[in-house]
Amino acid sequence: MTSTTKTGLGICGAAIVLGVLGDALLRSMPWGINILLWIGALILIIMALIKWQHIRLTGGGRWLIIPALVFAAAFAWRDSIVLQTCNLLAMLTALALVALRSQAGQVRIAGLTDYGRALVQAGVQAMFGVLSLIFGDIHWKQIAPNRSSGRLIAIGSGVLIAVPLLFIFGSLFVAADAAFEKIIHDLFNWNMNELMAHLIWIGFWGWITAGFLRQMLLTKEPAALPMAAPTLGIIEIGTALGALNVLFLVFVLVQFRYLFGGEELIRSTTGLTYAEYARRGFFELVTVAALVLPTLLGAHHLLRKENRSAQQAIRVLAGTLIALLFVIMFSALMRMRLYQIEFGLTELRLYTTVFMGWLAIVFVWFAFTVLRDQRNRFAFGALMASCVVLIGLNALNPDDFIVRVNAGRTDAVNPFDASYVVGLSADAVPALIDSLPGLSDQDRCATAARILRRWSPPTNFDWLTWNWNRIQAWQAVSANQVYLQQIACPMQRD
């Protein structure tokens, strides 16, 4: 029996185990410690398969199992849906790169197309990898019929013969005796809907796990396909980037006049207040910043490397555009600051601001890599910046931060939007309880009632959904139960 067949059989067994664990652990919602337990089981099984088949993982992707485990652990830490969605995407991306680059290859020196291919291949393997495993990798004829396997075949044949006989005689016994009928009924009184649900979830998690393990342990990294990509000369690229530079420069000059010219100038020329002016432009400017990155990457990729002067020209044009973009991003931050002072902080405003900060880091990395002819290092740096920013967000606890920032807006016209913050996740509950004394009577009673309704400790707790911040929220409500009941609106307590 070849090592490929042995590994394939091991992957099938591992997929069954992980499928059962997936059904037992991951059906409990909302996700908490259960996803960490399942990812931990996946890692342990991978280690067991590697040791069993003496597989050497020398690729750089194997180290990305660490951030995958970190972001899985974040599900047992924070409760914010937005944050958990980001953690899930980061975990899946890390696992996709683990599958692609564990046996060979690097992740530090790879292009964006390599990362994109990893995500596509991970999806394809998750859907169809198990078919290749069963019908291609495992050579069933190599499983020699020895003495023990012959016994197993004989036992299986006996079972097949016995089943119809048991059914016939068992039916007669059931009809003959009421006590025997009750025993058989209790023994086989299965909830078929529940049984089918278990089988479907076991099949789902086992199926995608088999594809993942196959890609990681059996599939060698395919050679990159040669692609005759279209190219453009410096005249075409330079004209396009030069026009963008002129447009960005004009906008920057307008920003200096209006953003720093005061509210009277804005009101007299646009008819908008300072806050309305800021609100209108922030998200559009973030979109501009996001679109500049693929534009510059595409321009650098399409540029025909004719001579050093062409490469130097693209560096100057791209560098100038980035410098102007940083001024525009600073303008966007100023707009957000004005907007936040007037209207408060929300998840959308916070996450968009963080995204723009990540873009700033990526643009600096772009200048140090792509513009210095080290394009193959750009993607890894951008990926690591994403991980660092996301870990920082988990440490910040965005929902708690939003409540505390809004509670501190004592000089604003509308200092605290209780109707918004009360709908945040469990991460915000302790800060929300602390902010109650500063609310108006109406907001205080409505907020207290909503807290009691959403975050009173449950009577039945599923430990698989254990989450640190949900526990903290329940404890905070329990500790302030009497106070919350005293101030809660009577009609909204239930």
Image: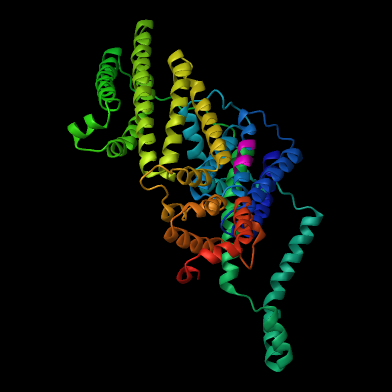
| Magenta residues (range) | 66-71
> Residue 128: x percent and y percent?
52, 47
Name the foreground residue: 255 vs 30: 255
Query: Residue 336, located in which quarter of the rendered image?
Result: top left
Name the foreground residue: 43 vs 229: 43
> Residue 392: x percent and y percent?
56, 36
Q: Residue at x 47, y 59 (%)?
A: 444
Q: Is residue 39 above or below residue 292?
A: below
Q: Is residue 13 above or below residue 272?
A: below
Name the foreground residue: 189 vs 13: 189
Q: Residue at x 69, y 82 (%)?
A: 186
Judge from the rendering whether residue 118 lies leftward or rightward of residue 69; answer left or right.
Answer: left
Q: Residue furthest right?
A: 147
Query: Residue 312, located in which quarter of the rendered image?
Result: top left
Query: Residue 173, located in which quarter of the rendered image?
Result: bottom right
Residue 456 appears in the picture as rendered: no
Q: Is residue 493 above or below residue 34?
A: below
Q: Residue at x 27, y 36 (%)?
A: 277
Q: Is residue 190 above or below residue 248?
A: below
Residue 72 appears in the picture as rendered: yes
> Residue 420: x percent and y percent?
42, 53
